[in-house]
């Protein structure tokens, strides 16, 4: 299968600090790639380079067979690659109604009739039609994240970047959003990159997981290896331990 | 009425227009709930009505001279008294409200867009654009406003139009600073990044995403500053550099009344009181607007 | 039977809303002894407000009422605000989510700690400094002599939270309230902080109330768990019996978390029953 995203030797410097230190990765078309790591590991920086939010980088980044340069992304790129942010409170304009928020991609990419597309987009992410003219602060966190997902899906991208899409949400809402994301990814055959600090969340959605630490990829895991606990790098061992720590104690106590 | 209120305050508006009307309604209610701001609104409304119906309200023509009845104290026939040429001061104050409103309106619609445009472009683009624009702003801010306005009017020649130009040219820097500071904090927000990832152009981001959020603080500041602009206009008029006689501009009226202040106090006091009341009214609205429009104060 | 450290009965917290007051805590009763009690719930369940109400830290215009709110047998509702403030910090301490907001950014960690010792134990400056270093050592900060000279922005989030715990424990409180003490931290740091907290609380025989959204975490760490939903306690059970939780809300919360080694195509979604919120 061909790679939708291919990165070779990507380095990003913030002053003397290397946020990314020559990483290489490939994301297969139609599959979900997970990137897991702790804060400061550089996992979000990968997405920022892809989307042009981090202007200064060296290396080779190829998306859909085209090499990227600098921070400029043309309209065709924006239509093909969309992103969902961590904090649904921050990623929606506070003074725009849901209608205005969803109208943005329609107007920018001239997608068609908003009166038809917006109700459809809301229905696609399981939102009732009456949220259309409300403001983000009138919605719950889960509903806001659904709006953000609807906005990302409107241009019908082939690549979806997910930056900690559930870590600001309650666990019951996280389950709903993860189910929604998985269903959409499968149904539309999207290429997805999911970045998270939570190994269990990443492993739930992604068959292939990269573990990052201090700007480097320290281990690549597939789901079988994870399930069997076959991890080698100390960072991966620590992440597995952290997500099992609590769980095992709880189940030990139950015995 | 209650059906209309329900339509306006519903949590599930059915159209864009209804959502917008509802927000406006809620803002107006909040503004009216503040007694001082409501008082300011009433005063400005009175000013508007007076200006609109000046020909009907004024008992005499503003420039009708009656040298036999010059410098009359306030009486039933002349409630504000008469000036040195026997003109009715009440009628002149009423007609003068038009001049004041024109000055305020023209200054506001020139100052706010200039300040906003410079501020948000500087804040959004950053780098050398920001440095150049802000240093220019600093240069303008380094002069005392009235002195700069005086210099401009002296260069352009006295007159009401030039006074407005001078006021606009000296009043924009604080607005640019304010808009830039707001933009700097907005620029790093996720929703701006999200707009960029949607493919929005810089112009679209500035106009549709950043402008709506900066405009409210600038608007509040503008109403506060309008009082200052009225005073500068009056000051220029007082110094003979604004509206020219026989135009009934309030500042110019105070200036002529100054000669008679000891014996005929009403000549200067009546237009002075009008200046004071209108400045106060705009200040009160400005304070109220700031509270209503500031998203941080909402929900408290 | 000895008096429990904390008795809460019929606690209510209300905020004025557009259509009359809105209760965020609706009649909550529980007691805490010298043990670790976990309060679990989702956002808006009233868990943080309960902790704040105990410390009298509800921001205006919120209103607190309770049938009984007592600390070590002393009725808190009868105390004057000044006496209540003295109790807070000295005998009841609170650790907040993000230490970076709670530490003073222009004072070194050591200076802030030493101040606490000087105020609460009336120690001299040298003595206070020695105590601060010992306190940092007790929360397992490596090289405490160096850390006392650092400013809050120069230390990591985990170290900041350790310093915060050291500061809160300095006056020797009997009860510690921890509101999401580790949710701003990485998972691998989290475990270490909780271990340290456990060690100190056990060694000093203190009571601890841990407020968290993370059911697994609370279950692993605490003796007893109170499950909050919509301002009420829907279930109270020993942490080790969590797997046998009866309430559908608790069961739903446990089931909807993705776990390593479990392959599920779809995560079970919590179906909220309106009757849970009713009494």
Image (cartoon, coloured by chain):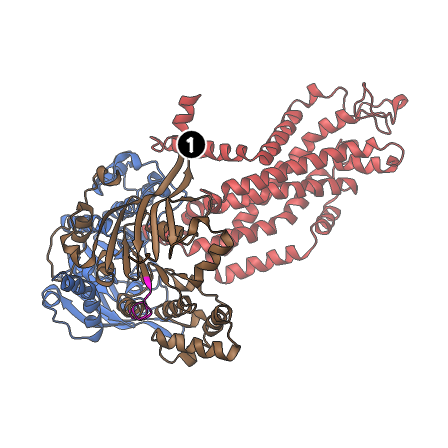
Q: Nearer the viewer, residue B154 or B84?
A: B84
Q: Dividing the picture into quarters, in which one does residue B163 lie?
A: top right
Return the residue at label 1: B22
The stretch of residues the image draws in magenta is C199-207
Give how far across and how far down residue A237 sits, in percent: 19, 72
Q: Is residue A1 above or below residue B60?
A: below
Label 1 sits on a secondary structure element that is: helix
Chain A as rendered: colour? blue
Does residue B201 appear in the picture of this structure? no
The quadrant of the picture occupied by the N terminus of chain B is top left
Q: Is residue B38 above or below residue C254?
A: above
Does residue C24 appear in the picture of this structure? yes
Q: Nearer the viewer, residue A58 or A124?
A: A124
Q: Dividing the picture into quarters, in which one does residue B274 lie?
A: top right
Give how far across and how far down residue B280 sits, in percent: 66, 38
What count of labels does the image hold? 1
Q: Which chain is brown?
A: C
């Amino acid at each position: 299968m061909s790679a939708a995203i291919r990165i070779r030797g990507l380095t990003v410097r913030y002053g003397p600090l290397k946020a990314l230190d020559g990483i290489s990765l490939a994301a297969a078309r139609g599959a979900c790639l997970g990137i897991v790591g702790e804060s400061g590991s550089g996992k979000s920086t990968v997405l920022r380079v892809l989307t042009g939010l981090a202007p200064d980088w060296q290396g080779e980044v190829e998306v859909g067979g085209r090499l990227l340069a600098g921070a400029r992304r043309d309209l065709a790129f924006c239509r093909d690659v969309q992103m969902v942010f961590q904090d649904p409170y921050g990623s929606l304009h506070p003074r725009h109604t849901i209608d205005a928020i969803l109208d943005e991609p329609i107007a920018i990419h001239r997608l068609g009739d908003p009166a038809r597309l917006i109700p459809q987009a809301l229905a696609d992410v399981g939102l009732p039609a009456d949220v259309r003219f409300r403001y983000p602060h009138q919605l719950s966190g889960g509903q806001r994240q659904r709006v953000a997902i609807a906005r990302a899906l409107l241009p019908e991208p082939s690549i979806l970047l997910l930056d900690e899409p559930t870590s600001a949400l309650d666990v019951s809402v996280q389950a709903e959003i993860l189910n929604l994301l998985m269903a959409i990814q499968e149904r539309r055959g999207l290429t997805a990159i999911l970045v998270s600090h939570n190994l269990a969340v990443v492993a739930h959605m992604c068959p292939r997981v990269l573990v990052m630490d201090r700007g480097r990829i320290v281990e690549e895991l597939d789901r079988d290896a994870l399930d069997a606990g076959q991890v080698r790098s100390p960072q991966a061992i620590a992440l597995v331990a952290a997500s099992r720590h609590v769980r095992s104690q709880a189940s030990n106590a139950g015995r | 009425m209650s059906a209309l209120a329900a339509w306006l305050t519903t949590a599930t508006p059915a159209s864009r227009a209804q959502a917008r009307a509802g927000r406006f309604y809620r803002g107006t209610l909040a503004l009216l709930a503040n007694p001082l701001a409501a008082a300011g609104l009433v005063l400005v409304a009175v000013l508007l009505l007076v200006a609109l119906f000046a020909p009907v309200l004024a008992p005499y023509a503003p420039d009708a001279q009656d040298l036999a009845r010059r410098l009359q104290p306030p009486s039933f026939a002349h409630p504000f008294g008469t000036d040195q040429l026997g003109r009715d001061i009440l009628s002149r104050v009423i007609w003068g409200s038009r001049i004041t409103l024109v000055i305020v309106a023209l200054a506001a619609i020139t100052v706010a867009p200039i300040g906003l445009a410079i501020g948000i472009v500087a804040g959004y683009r950053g780098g050398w654009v920001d440095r150049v624009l802000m240093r220019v702003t600093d240069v303008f801010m380094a002069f005392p406003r009235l002195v700069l306005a005086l210099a401009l009017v002296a260069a352009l020649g006295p007159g009401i139009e030039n006074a407005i130009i001078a006021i606009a040219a000296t009043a924009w820097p604080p607005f640019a600073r304010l808009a830039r500071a707001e933009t700097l904090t907005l620029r790093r927000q996720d929703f701006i990044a999200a707009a960029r990832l949607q493919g929005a152009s810089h112009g679209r981001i500035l106009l549709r995403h950043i402008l709506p959020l900066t405009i409210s603080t600038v608007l509040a500041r503008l109403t506060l500053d309008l009082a200052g602009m009225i005073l500068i206009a009056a000051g220029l008029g007082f110094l003979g550099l604004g509206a020219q006689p026989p135009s009934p501009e309030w500042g110019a009226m105070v200036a002529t009344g100054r000669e008679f202040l000891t014996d005929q106090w009403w000549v200067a006091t009546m237009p002075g009181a009008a200046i004071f009341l209108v400045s106060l009214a705009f200040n009160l609205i400005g304070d109220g607007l700031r509270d209503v429009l500031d998203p941080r104060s909402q929900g408290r | 039977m000895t008096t429990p450290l904390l008795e809460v009965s019929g606690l209510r917290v209300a905020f004025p809303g557009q259509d009359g007051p809105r209760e965020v805590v609706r009649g909550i009763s529980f007691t805490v002894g010298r043990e670790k009690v976990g309060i679990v719930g989702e956002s808006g369940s009233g868990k943080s407000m309960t902790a704040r109400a105990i410390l009298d830290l509800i921001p205006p215009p919120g209103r607190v009422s309770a049938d009984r709110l007592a600390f070590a047998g002393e009725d808190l509702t009868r105390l004057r605000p000044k006496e209540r403030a003295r109790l807070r910090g000295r005998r009841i301490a609170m650790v907040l989510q993000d230490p970076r907001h709670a530490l003073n950014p222009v004072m070194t960690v050591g200076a802030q700690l030493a101040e606490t010792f000087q105020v609460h134990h009336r120690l001299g400056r040298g003595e206070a400094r020695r105590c601060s270093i010992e306190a940092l050592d007790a929360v397992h900060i490596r090289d405490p002599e160096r850390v006392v000279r650092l400013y809050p922005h120069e230390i990591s989030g985990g170290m900041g939270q350790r310093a915060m715990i050291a500061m809160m424990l300095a006056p020797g409180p009997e009860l510690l309230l921890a509101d999401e003490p580790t949710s701003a931290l990485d998972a691998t740091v989290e475990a270490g902080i909780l271990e340290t907290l456990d060690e100190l609380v056990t060694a000093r025989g203190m009571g601890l109330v841990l407020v968290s959204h993370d059911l697994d975490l609370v279950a692993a760490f605490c003796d007893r768990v109170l499950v909050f939903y919509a301002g009420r306690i829907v279930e109270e059970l020993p942490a080790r019996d969590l797997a046998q939780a009866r309430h559908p809300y608790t069961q739903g919360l446990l089931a909807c978390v993705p776990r390593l080694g479990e392959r599920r195509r779809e995560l079970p979604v919590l179906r909220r029953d309106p009757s849970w919120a009713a009494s």
